[in-house]
Image: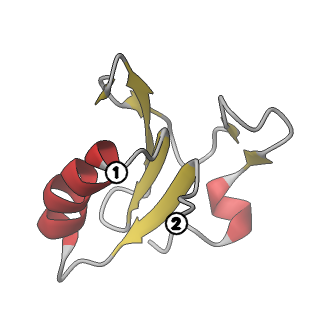
Amino acid sequence: ILLPDLVAKVLSTATESVDFIKKMAIYMNTGINEYWIVSRKTARPNILLKENGIYSEPMMYSKDDTVKSEIFEDLKIKPHIAGLCLR
């Protein structure tokens, strides 16, 4: 089975805790190396990178920052321009 190296998720307010906690554990245990989470409540992206088999503390960005992937060097997104932050 081929798995992606990166998963990006805009959290639904109805399932935010499931996506942030349960799915994070699933992704970490299945080999997803980079997990992007954007909360609709705060409009702030959080990036988790896998280090030594577990996700590091989230790198937190403001909605106006340029978010950059650590594993795909050409991937750069401004969440508010991409429509990811729906506040």
Of the two numbered discs 1 and 2 on the same chain, state the one appearing first in sequence: 1
Q: Residue 45, image x and y in percent?
A: 47, 48
Q: Residue furthest bottom?
A: 14
Residue highlighted by disc 2: 85
Q: Horizontally, is 75 left or right of 11 in the view?
A: right
Circles 1, 2 touching at the beta carbon (< 8 Å)? no
Mark-to-mark CA distance, 1 and 2: 27 Å
Q: Residue furthest top?
A: 52
Q: Residue 32, image x and y in percent?
A: 45, 47
The amino acid pointed to by label 1 is Thr
Query: Residue drawn at (70%, 39%), measured in percent from left and top?
Result: 66
SS at mark 1?
Answer: loop
Q: Residue furthest right?
A: 74
Assess disc 2: are there few (<14), some (14-19) or many (≥20) residues with their C-alpha within 10 Å of its C-alpha.
many
Callout in the foreground (1, 2):
1
The amino acid pointed to by label 2 is Cys
Query: Residue drawn at (65%, 29%), measured in percent from left and top?
Result: 70
Residue highlighted by disc 1: 30
Q: Horizontally, is 9 left or right of 67 in the view?
A: left
- The colouring scheme, among rainbow, by chain, secondary structure or one colour, is secondary structure
Q: Is residue 84 above or below residue 30?
A: below
SS at mark 2?
Answer: loop
Assess disc 1: are there few (<14), some (14-19) or many (≥20) residues with their C-alpha within 10 Å of its C-alpha.
few
Question: Which residue is at the front of the view, 11 or 28?
Answer: 28
Q: Residue 85, image x and y in percent?
A: 52, 66
Question: Which residue is at the front of the view, 84 or 53?
Answer: 53
Question: Split into 4 quadrants, where in the image is the C terminus?
Answer: bottom left
